[in-house]
């Protein structure tokens, strides 16, 4: 028998089919280690089997081997990753593109290894080697996040019987760097140097803050020129929520000009009658012709929209909704651009003019505490602090 306080042992369970012997143990052998239970069978034969099996498991643990390697049939990492791509990324992920390259990198790195043989140290070493080769901190952290998801999915599927090895991998510090955005003159030059079919795409990005995938998936059914709004569909946004964006005068002119060109596909942005799916080569060529550096990617147009919005005095919380950020911390990166506007607020600092009475004619130096009402508060026998 086994006490509840013990970390491992042999015990008898009374099942509907009769009593049977079980073993239990933890790996690692700590109070917080994962608890394993294995069924060994009934009677004296089951008890003998339990003693032998427990001995094998404890020997594994003493030698640092994860017992789940024996409990669950080992699977090749690339086999699990391929199934992950097929059954999770393609069907359930809101943003398959964000997984594609990272999953491929992990598959190559751990090809030929079983899922159970990959340890926390293996993943830490992989990320450290990548950092030594020039990866940014954000690349390392994105790979860590995808690897964590793969193992979590494998655990949920019953392919991996131990603790997620990625959980203990420390995140890499990320350098926030400088958020690049275009000036008005740069934006005009970029549009002018772009191919004709790309110009409306760039203008739309500059006036909606949309991601490239959201813009290229935009359909005319989601554009309401009469009301002056367009919608990025929940199936294309990163957070899975529909986003409503007001249409300004510049974008209205651009979209009305496009509307005159018939599109059988129903998509707003097309090339030779077909949906426009990729513009990397064309955009890079436009950037080069405009005399800008390689740091100007299409995503810079989203930063430009947000930066212009803040510089024009827009509210950061409104911007959060327009960009579709789940938390204000993501939008806060643009708040430094309001420094000039914040500087103007110094006129509100310091004591008010002596002649300024309180709004209600009372003592302007007293701020009543919440729920107090002057004499009633004093009658309670205390001064609010």
Image: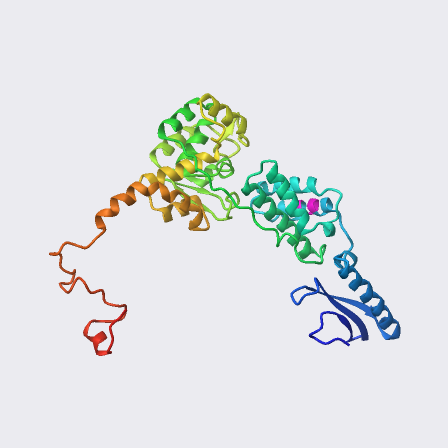
Left or right: 104 in relation to 214: right
Residue 15, can we see it?
no
Q: Is residue 115 left or right of residue 300?
A: right
Q: Position of residue 321 (x, y in %)?
A: 41, 47
Extent of the magenta region: 81-85
Q: Residue at x 34, y 34 (%)?
A: 249
Q: Residue at x 21, y 53 (%)?
A: 350
Say left or right for 165 vs 360. right
Q: In this picture, is 153 found above or below 56?
A: above
Principal secondary structure, stretch drawn in magenta = helix
Q: Toward which corner of the image does residue 52 lie, by quadrant?
A: bottom right
Q: Residue furthest right?
A: 45
| Quadrant holding the N terminus | bottom right
- Could you say where residue 235 lies in the image, as x and y percent from the top left? 53, 45
Question: Relative to residue 60, is residue 4 depicted above or below?
Answer: below
Q: Is residue 98 magenta?
A: no
User: Which corner quadrant holds the C terminus?
Assistant: bottom left
Q: Nearer the viewer, residue 214 or 100?
A: 100
């Amino acid at each position: 028998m086994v006490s509840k306080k013990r970390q491992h042992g042999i015990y008898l369970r009374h099942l509907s089919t009769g009593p049977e012997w079980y073993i239990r143990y933890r790996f690692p052998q700590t109070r917080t280690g994962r608890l394993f239970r294995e069924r060994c069978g009934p009677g004296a034969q089951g008890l003998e089997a339990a003693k032998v099996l427990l001995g094998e498991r404890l020997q594994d643990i003493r030698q640092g081997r994860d017992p789940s390697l024996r409990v669950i049939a080992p699977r090749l990492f690339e086999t699990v990753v391929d199934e992950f791509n097929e059954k999770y990324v393609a069907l359930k992920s809101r943003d398959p593109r964000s997984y594609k390259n990272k999953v491929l990198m992990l598959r190559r790195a751990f090809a030929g290894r079983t899922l159970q043989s990959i340890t926390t140290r293996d993943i830490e070493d992989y990320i450290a080697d990548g950092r030594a080769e020039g990866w940014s901190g954000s690349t390392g952290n994105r790979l860590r996040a995808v690897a964590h998801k793969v193992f979590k999915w494998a655990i949920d599927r019953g392919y991996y019987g131990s603790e997620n090895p990625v959980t203990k991998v420390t995140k890499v510090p990320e350098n926030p760097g400088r958020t690049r955005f275009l000036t008005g003159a740069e934006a005009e030059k970029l549009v002018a140097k772009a191919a004709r079919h790309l110009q409306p795409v760039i203008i739309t990005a500059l006036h909606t803050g949309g991601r490239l995938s959201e813009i290229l998936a935009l359909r005319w059914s989601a554009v309401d020129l009469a009301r002056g709004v367009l919608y990025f569909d929940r199936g294309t946004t990163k957070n899975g929520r529909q986003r409503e964006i007001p249409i300004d005068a510049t974008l209205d002119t651009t979209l009305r000009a496009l509307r005159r060109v018939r599109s059988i596909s129903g998509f707003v942005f097309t090339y030779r009658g077909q949906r426009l799916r990729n513009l990397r080569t064309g955009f890079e060529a436009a950037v080069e012709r405009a005399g800008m550096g390689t740091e100007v990617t299409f995503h810079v147009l989203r930063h430009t929209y947000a930066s212009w919005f803040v510089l024009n005095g827009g509210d950061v919380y409104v911007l959060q909704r327009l960009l579709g950020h789940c938390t204000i911390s993501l939008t806060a990166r643009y708040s430094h651009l309001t420094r000039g506007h914040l500087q103007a607020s110094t006129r509100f600092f310091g004591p008010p003019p002596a002649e300024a009475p309180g709004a209600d004619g009372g003592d302007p130096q007293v701020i009543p505490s919440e729920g107090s009402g002057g004499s009633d508060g004093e009658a309670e026998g205390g001064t609010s602090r």
